[in-house]
Amino acid sequence: MAGIPKVTHADFEEKVLKSELPVLIDFSGVWCAPCKMIEPFVEKIAKEYEGRLKVYELDVDESPQIAAKYQILSIPALLIFKDGVPVKSIVGAVPYKVIKKKVEEVIGK
């Protein structure tokens, strides 16, 4: 993703688990066509909720141990963390409104 910062196993704890803000992680892969389909939606969420939500991309091929830890079996998959714990998940290429609804369930409107 061009506009979304990456997170890896090396900085996952610092950027995600210790974050004071909720964090949306986009688990994806460069070879994943459905991941490319939702990329603009994830970028829009990042802009829309800037300052209230952190958004990162995690390449499952580069950080397979993180994907395994959170039982990511299919991508694209989005996990929303709050206080270091995953509280919402979305699997598959879903419409923007589905992602927005899950985000708002965690951080409010």
Image: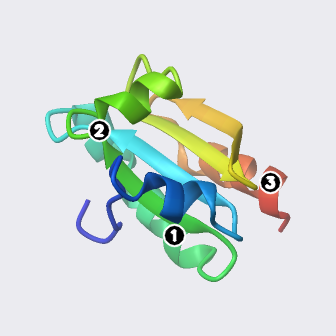
Give the number of the mark in front: 2 or 1. 2
Crowding at label 3, few (<14), some or many (≥20) Cα neighbours within 10 Å?
some
Residue type indicated by callout 3: Val
- What residue appears at the point 50 percent right and 64 percent down from the top-left corner? 15
Query: Mark 2: which secondary structure?
Result: loop
Crowding at label 1, few (<14), some or many (≥20) Cα neighbours within 10 Å?
many
Identify the residue under disc 2: 63
Quadrant in the rendering for residue 73: top left
Query: Mark 3: which secondary structure?
Result: helix
Give the number of the mark in front: 2 or 3. 2
Q: Which mark is residue 46?
A: 1
Q: Are marks 3 and 1 in contact (CB under 8 Å)?
A: no
Give the CA distance from mark 3 to mark 1: 14 Å
Q: Is residue 54 left or right of residue 27?
A: right
Q: Are marks 2 and 3 in contact (CB under 8 Å)?
A: no
Give the CA distance from mark 2 to mark 3: 25 Å
Identify the residue under disc 3: 106
Q: Judge by depth and name the residue closer to the eye, 104 or 5.
A: 5
User: Residue 43: where, in percent of width, then height?
Assistant: 42, 65
